[in-house]
């Protein structure tokens, strides 16, 4: 599991899922809308479940308002 990696987010998807695209890059689909930080919260919850770590250890380093985000686990 990489400590920092890029995530491309698709908000308002039909189902939530995490797909590995390449080394250090993932595609994450969430059902939450991209309003009021709801999609970011859903991304953190989904990644915490996927990597089996607590939500508090996942942080969005860059891309708070964009679809492409740099995630740090640690």
Image (tube, helix red, strand yellow):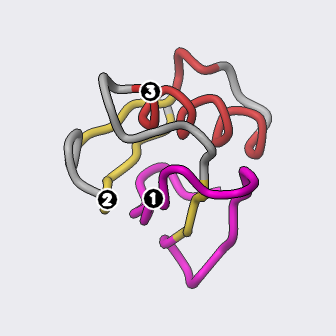
Depth check, mark 3 against mark 1: the one in front is 3
Magenta segment includes 36: no
At a point 71% along the width and 57% down the height, the residue shown is 14
Instruction: Classify residue 53 as left or right of residue 31.
Output: right
State the SS at label 3: helix
Earlier along the polypeptide chain: callout 3 or callout 1?
1
* Residue shown at the point (55%, 68%) measured from the top left: 26
Residue 59 vertical placement versus 65 (above, below) = above
Residue 54 x %, y %: 67, 19
Q: Position of residue 9 (x, y in %)?
A: 45, 58
Q: Give the labeled residue for mark 1.
A: 9
| Numbered range of the magenta stretch | 1-25
Above/below status of 20 relative to 28: below
What residue would you read off at disc 2?
A: 67
Residue pictured at 30% horizontal, 23% vertical? 36
Q: Which mark is residue 38?
A: 3
């Amino acid at each position: 599991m990489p400590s920092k990696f890029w995530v491309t987010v698709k908000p308002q998807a039909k189902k939530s899922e995490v797909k590995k695209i390449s080394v250090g890059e993932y595609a994450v689909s969430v059902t939450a809308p991209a309003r009021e930080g709801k999609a970011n919260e859903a991304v953190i919850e989904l990644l915490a479940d996927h990597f089996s770590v607590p939500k508090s250890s996942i942080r969005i380093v860059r891309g708070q308002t964009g679809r492409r985000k740099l995630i740090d686990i640690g």
